[in-house]
Amino acid sequence: AQSVSQHNHHVILSEAASLELGCNYSYGGTVNLFWYVQYPGQHLQLLLKYFSGDPLVKGIKGFEAEFIKSKFSFNLRKPSVQWSDTAEYFCAVNAIGYSTLTFGKGTMLLVSP
Amino acid sequence: DVKVTQSSRYLVKRTGEKVFLECVQDMDHENMFWYRQDPGLGLRLIYFSYDVKMKEKGDIPEGYSVSREKKERFSLILESASTNQTSMYLCASSFSTGMTPEEGELFFGEGSRLTVL
C-alpha cells in the first residue's frame, strides 16, 4: 500500500526565514505527487504537483518542491516565508494501480511577524 | 472555477441520530470522495465513487455509508452517529484517475464540521 510521511507536525518560523517541509512516500513505481495547503478557515487547495519531467516544480505563492526519486522524497521549499503562509500543509501521493490520493498527516506552519 | 459545495458547514447532532452530509460539484467530474480530517491524523478516506451508483470503501468506512444517485451529488450517511464521529468532513471531486496532469487532482469543498453529543 502507498503511504506518505511528513517529517514535522508543527513548524514555527519568523518572517523571511527559509522553509523546507519534508515528505517521503513509500511506493516503488511511478507516482504523482502533490502538496495541498489549508489556510485558516479555508478549504484545501492545490499548491503544486509533479507528474513527470523536471523534478523541480514551481507552485503558487513562491513555493517549489523537488522530487528526488532515489530518496522517495518530495520536499516543499520557500526561500522567504511571510506571515500569510501560516497554514497547514499536506503532502499526497497517487500511484499507478491506486485509484485514490493518500495524504500525509500534515504540517502546521506558524509564521510569526 | 471548479466548485464543490457542501450543504452544511456546521452540524450538531445527538448520539444515535441519522446524519446526512451532502456534496455537489459543478464540473462534471467522474470521481467523488469523502474524507474526514482530524488533528494529527491528516485526511483519511471514508468512501469514494467512480460513477453514478458506484461506491468503493476507503480506509475507514465503518459506521458510514454513501449514496450517489446523480453524477454531481455524493452523500455521506451516518446511520447512527457516535461521539467518535465528531470531526471535519471533506468532500472532493476529480476527473478520472490516471497519470496525466489534468487528472488525479482533487478539488475540495469547504468542509462540514460535525459535533456529536
Image (tube, coloured by chain):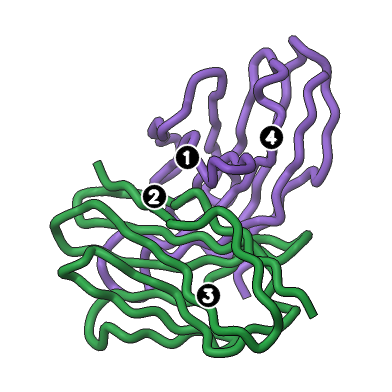
Q: Colour of chain B?
A: purple
**Which type of secondary structure does the marked residue at label 1 adopt?**
strand
- Between discs 2 and 3, the one toward the N terminus: 3
**Which type of secondary structure does the marked residue at label 3 adopt?**
strand
- Between discs 4 and 1, the one toward the N terminus: 1
In the rendered image, which residue does mark 4 sit on?
A: B87
The spot of residue A113 in percent (x, y) is 80, 80
Distance of mark 1 from mark 3, alpha carbons?
20 Å
- Circles 1 and 3 on the same chain: no
**The numbered mark 2 sits on a residue in which chain?**
A
**Which type of secondary structure does the marked residue at label 4 adopt?**
strand
**Amino acid type, residue under disc 1 in the picture:** Leu
- Proximity of marks 1 and 2: CB atoms separated by less than 8 Å: yes
Crowd band around label 1 with a 10 angstrom C-alpha radius: few (<14), some (14–19), many (20+): many
**The numbered mark 1 sits on a residue in which chain?**
B
The spot of residue B11 in percent (x, y) is 83, 34
**Amino acid type, residue under disc 3 in the picture:** Leu
- Circles 1 and 2 on the same chain: no
Crowd band around label 2 with a 10 angstrom C-alpha radius: few (<14), some (14–19), many (20+): many
In the rendered image, which residue does mark 3 sit on?
A: A47
The N terminus of chain B lies in which quarter of the figure? bottom right
In the rendered image, which residue does mark 2 sit on?
A: A102
Distance of mark 1 from mark 2, alpha carbons?
8 Å
The spot of residue A3 in percent (x, y) is 32, 47
Distance of mark 2 from mark 3, alpha carbons?
16 Å
- Proximity of marks 4 and 1: CB atoms separated by less than 8 Å: no
Answer left or right for A47 relative to B49.
Answer: right
Distance of mark 4 from mark 2, alpha carbons?
19 Å
**Amino acid type, residue under disc 2 in the picture:** Thr
In the rendered image, which residue does mark 1 sit on?
A: B45
Distance of mark 4 from mark 3, alpha carbons?
24 Å
